[in-house]
């Protein structure tokens, strides 16, 4: 088969012109420049913890000031800064400030253990970490190695050796020299294990992020119809690109208000929906299950919600149908994406002029992109209704993995196709269904767990000769990480020894939940783990 004979799937929406020559902040706030129609007195960010409001004017002044403050501390174009923060308006403001400077954000889960933070900070060459005082004790080694620590909540007294954030926002934004940002410059480096191995830095460019946002919210008939009248709830973790890309910046581009919640708690979330008349609720599958199971949904007025979007992991048809009943006025649908590829598919039920869609589908390929489904053995592209590996091509893709050209070329082939490692098919109505995963990745409640990371920890134990980690199906979490372990000769190691050895070194969702002792780990002649065989044993 010639490449020209590929079966290529496209959006039902026509391609649009995307201003992806613009740096991220110019694009997001384009309506507020020149003769744009943006109303800068409108609410942009609401902090649900304090009730504090930032208008669109406040947001723009603040991120420019923070940019000037960060610049004054010596951060320059292409330098990397780590954000180690819970959801807060400052998270968005700092990310925008760094983008505006031409600097790079690397976001990490603040609940990471010290060693997880150190690994990412070192690998991404972060020169500065912006955090809260409760996390500072995990940063001592980095600080001793010359990394500058900025502390957000230190108004009353100084945290040892940290710069106060309040100093940054007092900077004069007019002092800031305008950096020359190229569309190919990296704007953020989230971490993802991709299809195999350890977590790697994913280089997202200004052009990639702008394209991904535009594919959703731009055009006469946007695929994701956020508007200036929307109040969009944000409890999904902002350190994840799904939240920054599909929620925060997509909302800002459209002039919507974003209600920021530091931590998901079902009753609080329902109370906020009622109080702020929230119109859009982005979720992950475990949140859908929480709504479905809760007997208390009746106690709240949830009628303002017009849209509920799920993504980040598989959602079956049954919970999807059940949650619809609890939100009678809401359109429900899924998005499907990947850190390396931004949004790959979005339900066309969310379009301004919507299409009829089916539950269980994870959307239709986004516009200005091409998708194909390839046979996992021959690599030949497949027609509709045939399952294979999903591949995606377009300007929204990552530039590559940081310092890892080999992993990059394994993921994006010479023709520009990114191989997702997901198995699915496209049906007669252009809807995509994910049926399995080819890659090693484990998804615990939508969070990434890289088996290779846990395997490395396991085999560092003196009584473990060999180990493999695979996903096991779980009703609540979707998947949980479980380990197959080969004991060293003479060792009396038990399940709890293994768990306590590994689990204190990793964030809660990476914890090994079950251990199975075996004689050998099945491997191919090449030495490659035969994970499928192990999964079959579960
Ligand atoms: P990462 N259904 C099934 N699996 C999914 C789905 C879905 N709707 N969405 C994501 N996944 C899995 O990098 C799939 O295996 O990004 C995919 O390769 O943490 C992997 O999760 C990627 O995990 C959006 C909507 C981004 C979703 C996302 C993905 C966030 C997760 C933008 O608009």
Image (cartoon, rainbow, N blue to C red):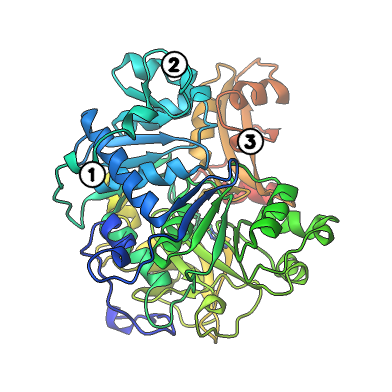
| Above-or-below relation of 505 to 521 | above
State whether residue 157 appears in this view: yes
488 or 285: which is nearer to us? 285
Q: Quadrant of the N terminus?
A: bottom left
Instruction: Assign a secondary structure to mark 2.
Output: loop
Q: Secondary structure at mark 3?
A: strand
Pointer 2 local density, CA inside 10 Å: few below 14, some 14–19, many at least 20: some
Is the C-beta separation of discs 1 and 3 under 8 Å?
no
Mark 1 to mark 2: distance in Å?
26 Å
Q: Tell me: 333 left or right of 146.
A: right
- Which residue is disc 2 drawn over? 159
Cβ at disc 3 under 8 Å from ligand 1: no
The earlier-in-sequence mark between 1 and 3 is: 1
Q: Secondary structure at mark 1?
A: helix
Figure check: 498 above or below 67: above
Q: Nearer the viewer, residue 457 or 448?
A: 448
78 w.r.t. 505: above or below:
below
Residue 442 vs residue 528: left or right? right
Find residue 106 and report its image quarter: top left
Residue 101's disc is 1
Q: Which residue bears the numbered disc 3?
A: 484
Q: Is residue 162 or residue 479 the one in the foreground?
A: 162
Instruction: Give residue 102's position: percent from left, percent from top.
Output: 22, 46
Q: Going 65% across and 15% down the picture, which residue do you hit?
A: 490
């Amino acid at each position: 088969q010639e490449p020209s004979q590929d079966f290529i799937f496209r959006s039902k929406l026509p391609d649009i012109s995307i201003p992806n020559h613009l740096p991220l902040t110019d694009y997001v706030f384009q309506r507020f420049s020149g003769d744009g129609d943006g109303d800068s007195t409108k609410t942009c960010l609401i902090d649900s913890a304090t009730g504090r409001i930032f208008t669109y004017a406040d947001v723009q002044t603040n991120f420019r000031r923070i940019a000037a403050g960060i610049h004054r501390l010596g951060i320059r174009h292409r330098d990397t800064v780590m954000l180690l923060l819970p959801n807060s308006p400052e998270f968005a403001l700092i990310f925008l400030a760094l983008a505006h400077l031409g600097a790079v954000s690397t976001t990490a889960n603040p609940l990471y253990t010290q060693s997880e933070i150190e690994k990412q900070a070192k690998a991404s060459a972060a020169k500065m970490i912006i955090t809260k005082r409760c996390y500072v004790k995990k940063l001592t080694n980095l600080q001793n190695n010359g990394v500058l620590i900025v502390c957000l909540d230190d108004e009353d007294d100084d945290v040892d050796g940290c710069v106060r954030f309040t100093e940054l926002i007092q900077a004069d934004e007019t002092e800031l020299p305008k950096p020359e940002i190229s569309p190919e410059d990296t704007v953020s480096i989230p971490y993802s294990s991709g299809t195999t191995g350890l977590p790697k830095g994913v280089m997202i460019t200004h052009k990639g992020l702008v394209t991904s946002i535009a594919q959703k919210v731009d055009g006469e008939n946007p695929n994701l119809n956020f508007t200036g009248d929307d109040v969009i709830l944000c409890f999904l973790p902002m350190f994840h690109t799904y939240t920054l890309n599909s929620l925060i910046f997509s909302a800002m581009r459209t002039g919507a208000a974003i209600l920021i919640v530091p931590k998901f708690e079902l009753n609080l979330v329902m109370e906020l929906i009622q109080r702020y008349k929230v119109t859009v609720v982005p979720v992950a599958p475990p949140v859908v299950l929480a709504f479905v199971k809760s007997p208390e949904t009746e106690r709240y007025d949830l009628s303002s919600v017009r849209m509920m979007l799920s993504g980040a992991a598989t959602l079956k048809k049954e919970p999807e149908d059940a949650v619809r009943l609890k939100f009678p006025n809401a359109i429900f649908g899924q998005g499907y994406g990947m850190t390396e590829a931004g949004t790959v598919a979005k339900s066309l039920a969310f379009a301004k002029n919507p299409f009829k869609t089916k539950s269980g589908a994870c959307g239709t390929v986004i516009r200005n992109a091409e998708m194909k489904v390839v046979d996992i053995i021959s690599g030949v592209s497949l027609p509709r209704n045939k399952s294979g590996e999903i591949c995606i091509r377009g300007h929204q893709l990552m530039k590559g993995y940081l310092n890892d050209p080999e992993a990059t070329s394994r993921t994006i082939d010479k023709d520009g196709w990114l191989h997702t490692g997901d198995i699915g098919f496209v049906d007669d109505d252009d809807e995509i269904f994910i049926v399995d995963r080819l890659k090693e990745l484990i998804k615990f409640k939508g969070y990434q767990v890289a088996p290779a990371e846990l395997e490395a920890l396991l085999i560092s134990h003196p009584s473990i000769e060999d180990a493999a980690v695979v996903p096991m199906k779980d009703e609540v979490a979707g998947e949980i990480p479980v380990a197959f372990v080969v004991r060293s000769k003479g060792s009396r190691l038990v399940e709890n020894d293994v768990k306590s050895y590994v689990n204190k070194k990793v964030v809660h969702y990476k914890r090994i939940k079950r251990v199975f002792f075996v004689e050998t780990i099945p491997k191919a002649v090449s030495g490659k783990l035969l994970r499928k065989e192990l999964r079959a044993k579960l």
